[in-house]
């Protein structure tokens, strides 16, 4: 319920064109008074289940906000060298001499184990500097420790507003407190383990933008001329140092972690062609300009999908191995931390591995790359251990709610009034909808996206076999065509249905025992072949001699001659299209994978493309029963599938076709994937496609083998990509191979910023005395 839009309330609208900043506590005064009343005395409410009144008490669990609002609510400034609200005054951040901004470069080795090799490395991090084993991470302060720090700090809601010009002399040196937050008035506030959440959404977005723009060498790169000056001052790699020519122009050699212009153009062409399944992501190809190789307008969710799924595919084969692997580990970290279901043992391992990953990145990128956003990544795991899954603690829901409210503004001169009026109308309509008949379509009983109800029978009266009960629905009710399968295909389809019917498993075991008794020295492959050929015939004998069951008797006689073919189907929370049905579409929903019955240490799934969707009807004395089958083209599971053990990325060979004699699967067994070729021209990636498994909407894993499909009443809840399978992320704790910044002939010569950049020679001119373009801070979102 907490994820539904109807339960996100608009409780306060602060008038004015500007944010109140630290003075927001003045507006929070009524809220704090009500929270005190809820905790101390409670309010009398009615229990509709027990039909009686009771005193309800409540507490404020935590706040969810972006990083600038974190400072407004907590009182700890998120700017400067002490921006981290966890490390606080014990951070090792410093201000770059040329860049002029705080940097968290070489601040993460202290989080490593005391005996780790990175601690004694004097050349890979800050020049001639090691971290002794006695230096550990900053202590974790309790709520009471923080309360002692803010006890004597003034508040802003007792008649005197916050003035940023009047600061404590120790501010920015030993602490970053600017006020005592009004939330400390709550008696239980010091006892909470998490008071203010770090927003994973904005952290991931900013980390991705820094990483992407630096690798693609766009104008927003962190590897600019000032960053190279700082590299020369703080770091060891001489290949990244700049030098000055006689005409006072800076010469900046290309780094090995940046792509060349031809490679960037290949990435642009690849993004323009990539297609996702329906509801997976927006059209990222619309954010790319192929002509000049530029990128623009990446939304938060675009960055979310790109970081977790596309970036490892884009960079594979284009960057050296020792640079690519730490980036892939960072992408896998966000996939794990953003999963719908979290496992505590995995999070404890992840908490150690992410520190190693950040240290590897410090050996690759310049100090200017590591701002507060990159540093906050190492604290996300601890918050996940304490606070649970991220969908309850990130800003996606509230940002979308705020965006919806802003779009309701009709009168620009009365912004607040427009928002309040439209919100009240929406709230009243939802409240009244609760009292309408369930047959009337309202915002309360709106059908979720890709929802496939089984409306033929009720669960209490349905006596059909389990194979007929799986909820599914045709995508086009009036579509489809009638066709006749060949005898060979009909036999294969019917046999596959019988072997996967739960009620016939005992008959299958009985058949296996008879075969082994008749052919004791026969191989298992031969027995399986005989089972495919003869099980359907033997089943009639088993059913006739077995207990009376009308459904088993009818299914043993086989399906009707005519089958129904369709172009699309909704099942398992997915929308499937056949291969020929998506031509001209922006989406592609024909990728299929099936979990294998035998698991090994490599890969047990089968991957293919959907060719046909068939409805096989079995005539029964109790009614009409239909089984939905997918006919697919399968890739060879042995020669055509490979798995990277470090990144867990799965590839299929587009030319290795297998399982020709077994093309059918039950639609209920199908899961959706999409395939994409690699933009790299590396020989080892030719003809290989990356496999990306998608997550159905509204499906949650509540236990190891318990999958539940929710009945969310708002389709917007399921717009955010989250993993539904368990992912193991572990960084190699061994020392990283030396980062070799290759000497290339590509050198950037810094000259006038107005010069044309379309020349593809080895020099690029920028003025030596022209400063970097100042970009907005990472926490500006």
Image (cartoon, grey):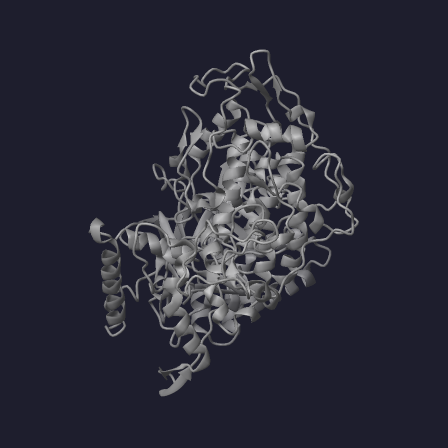
Query: Which of the two residues, 510 or 376, is positioned nearer the viewer here?
Result: 376
Residue farthest top in this picture: 246
Query: Which of the two residues, 180 or 672, is positioned nearer the viewer here?
Result: 180
Would you place residue 755 above or below residue 197 in this image? Answer: above
Q: Is residue 368 visible?
A: yes
Would you place residue 517 above or below residue 299 in this image? Answer: below
Q: Position of residue 517 (x, y in %)?
A: 69, 63
Q: Is residue 453 left or right of residue 643?
A: left
Query: Which of the two residues, 396 or 618, is positioned nearer the viewer here?
Result: 396
Q: Position of residue 316 (x, y in %)?
A: 58, 34
Would you place residue 590 above or below residue 509 in this image? Answer: above
Dividing the picture into quadrants, the one containing residue 716 is: bottom left
Residue farthest bottom in this picture: 52
Query: Which of the two residues, 440 or 298, is positioned nearer the viewer here?
Result: 298
Q: Position of residue 566 (x, y in %)?
A: 35, 49
Dividing the picture into quadrants, the one containing residue 511 is: bottom right
Q: Is residue 625 visible?
A: no
Would you place residue 595 above or below residue 239 in this image? Answer: below
Q: Residue at x 44, y 37 (%)?
A: 274
The number of numbered badges drawn on the structure is 0
| Quadrant for the N terminus in the image | bottom left
Q: Is residue 123 left or right of residue 744?
A: right
């Amino acid at each position: 319920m907490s994820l539904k839009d109807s339960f996100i309330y608009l409780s306060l609208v602060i008038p004015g064109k500007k944010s109140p900043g630290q003075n927001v506590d003045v507006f929070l005064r009524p809220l704090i008074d009500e929270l005190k009343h809820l905790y101390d005395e409670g309010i009398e409410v009615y229990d509709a289940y027990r039909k009686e009144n009771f005193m309800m008490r409540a507490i404020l669990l935590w706040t969810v906000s972006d990083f600038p609002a974190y400072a407004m609510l907590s009182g700890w400034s998120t700017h400067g060298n002490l921006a981290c609200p966890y490390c606080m005054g014990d951070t090792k951040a410093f201000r770059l001499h040329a860049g002029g901004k705080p940097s968290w470069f070489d601040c993460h080795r202290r989080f490593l184990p005391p005996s780790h090799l990175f601690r004694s490395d004097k050349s890979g991090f800050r020049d001639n500097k090691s971290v002794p084993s006695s230096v550990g991470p900053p202590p974790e302060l309790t709520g009471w420790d923080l309360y002692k720090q803010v006890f004597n700090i003034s508040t802003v809601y007792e008649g005197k507003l916050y003035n940023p010009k009047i600061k404590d002399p120790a501010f920015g040196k030993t602490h970053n407190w600017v006020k005592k937050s009004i939330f400390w008035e709550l008696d239980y506030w010091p006892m909470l383990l998490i008071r203010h959440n770090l927003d994973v959404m904005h952290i991931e977005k900013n980390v991705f933008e820094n990483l992407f723009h630096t690798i693609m060498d766009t104008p927003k790169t962190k590897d600019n001329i000032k960053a190279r000056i700082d590299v020369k001052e703080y770091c060891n790699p001489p290949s990244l140092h700049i030098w000055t020519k006689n005409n006072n122009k800076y010469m900046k050699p290309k780094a090995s972690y940046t792509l060349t212009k031809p490679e960037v153009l290949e990435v642009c062409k690849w993004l323009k062609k990539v297609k996702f399944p329906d509801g997976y992501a927006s059209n990222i190809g619309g954010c790319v300009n192929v002509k000049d190789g530029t990128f623009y307008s990446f939304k938060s969710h675009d960055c979310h999908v790109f970081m977790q799924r596309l970036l490892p595919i884009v960079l594979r084969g284009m960057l050296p191995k020792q640079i690519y692997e730490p980036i892939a580990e960072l992408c896998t970290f966000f996939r794990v931390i953003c999963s719908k279901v979290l496992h505590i043992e995995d999070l404890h391992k992840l908490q150690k591995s992410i520190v190693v990953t950040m240290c590897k990145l410090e050996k690759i990128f310049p100090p200017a790359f590591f701002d507060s956003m990159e540093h906050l990544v190492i604290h996300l795991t601890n918050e996940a251990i304490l606070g649970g899954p991220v969908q309850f603690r990130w800003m996606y829901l509230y940002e979308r709610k705020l965006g919806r409210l802003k779009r309701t503004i009709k009168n620009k001169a009365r912004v607040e009034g427009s928002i309040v009026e439209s919100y009240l109308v929406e709230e009243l309509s939802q409240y009244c909808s609760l009292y309408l008949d369930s047959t009337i379509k309202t915002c309360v009983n709106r059908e979720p996206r890709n929802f496939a109800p089984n409306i033929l029978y009720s669960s209490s009266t349905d006596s059909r076999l389990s194979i007929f009960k799986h909820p599914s629905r045709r995508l086009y009710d009036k579509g489809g065509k009638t066709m006749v399968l060949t005898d060979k295909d009909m036999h294969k389809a019917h046999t596959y249905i019988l072997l996967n019917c739960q009620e016939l498993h005992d008959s299958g075991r009985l058949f296996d025992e008879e075969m082994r008794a008749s052919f004791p020295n026969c191989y298992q492959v031969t027995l399986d072949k005989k089972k495919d050929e003869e099980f359907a015939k033997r089943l009639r004998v088993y059913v006739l001699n077995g207990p009376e069951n009308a459904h088993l008797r009818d299914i043993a006689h086989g399906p009707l001659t005519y089958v129904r073919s369709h172009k699309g189907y909704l099942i398992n929370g997915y929308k499937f299209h056949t291969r020929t049905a998506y031509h001209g579409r922006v989406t592609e929903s024909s990728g299929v994978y099936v979990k294998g019955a035998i698991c090994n240490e490599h890969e047990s799934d089968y991957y293919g493309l959907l060719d046909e969707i068939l409805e096989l009807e079995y005539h029964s004395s109790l009614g009409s029963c239909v089984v939905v089958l997918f006919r697919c083209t399968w890739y060879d599971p042995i020669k055509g599938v490979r798995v990277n053990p470090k990144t867990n990325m799965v590839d299929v060979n587009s030319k290795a076709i297998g399982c020709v004699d077994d093309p059918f699967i039950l639609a209920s067994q199908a899961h959706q994937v999409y395939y994409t070729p690699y933009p790299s021209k590396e020989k080892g990636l030719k003809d290989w496609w990356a496999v990306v498994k998608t997550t159905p909407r509204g499906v949650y894993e509540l236990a190891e083998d318990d999958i539940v499909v929710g009945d969310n009443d708002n389709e917007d809840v399921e717009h955010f990509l989250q993993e539904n399978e368990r992912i193991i992320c572990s960084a190699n704790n061994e020392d990283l191979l030396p980062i070799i910044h290759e000497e290339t002939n590509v050198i950037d010569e810094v000259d006038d910023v107005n010069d044309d950049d379309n020349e593809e020679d080895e020099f690029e001119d920028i003025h030596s005395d022209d400063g970097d373009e100042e970009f907005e801070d990472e926490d500006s979102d």
